Amino acid sequence: MTVGKRRGKSPRQEERRCLMEGVAQTRVQLNQAYAQFNLHSDPDLVESCVYEINALRSRYSYLVRQVKRLDAADEGRV
């Protein structure tokens, strides 16, 4: 048994883990927003859902791009 500091995840691995967690959470929120959209018939509520869905889709796209950026950087280092 060695005594010393335990090796944790690298900063890059931790960043990827956080990004993937964000992707999963955003996917859940997006599914909930679509469900709300399907429930409402009032034009104001429908419009609100549309804005929320568009915002979540933008966040999802951003997070996926960041994961791909990290993965490409890791492939470049190998």
Image: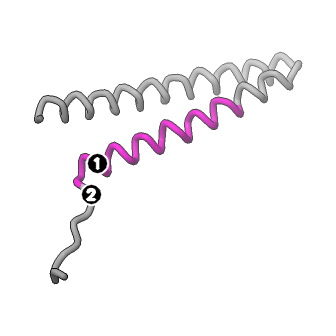
Pick the quarter of the image with the C terminus: top left
Pick the quarter of the image with the N terminus: bottom left
Furthest-right residue in this view: 41
Residue 63 figure quarter? top left
Percent position of residue 75, x then y: 18, 30
| Residue beneath the point at 11% across and 35% down | 77
Q: Tell me if 75 is positioned left or right of 41 in this view.
A: left
Which label sits on residue 67? none
Q: Tell me if 67 is positioned left or right of 74 in this view.
A: right
Give, as a single range, the part of the protein colored magenta.
10-32
Task: Please give the residue where the numbered disc 2 appears in the rendered image.
Answer: 9
User: As displayed, is residue 71 above or below residue 9?
Assistant: above
| Residue beneath the point at 56% across and 26% down | 55
Percent position of residue 2, x then y: 16, 80
Magenta stretch encompasses residue 66: no
In front: 4, or 24? Answer: 4
Query: What is the crowding at mark 2: few (fewer than 14 residues within 10 Å), some, or many (at least 20)?
Result: few
Task: Please give the residue where the numbered disc 1 appears in the rendered image.
Answer: 13
Furthest-left residue in this view: 77
Residue 48 figure quarter? top right
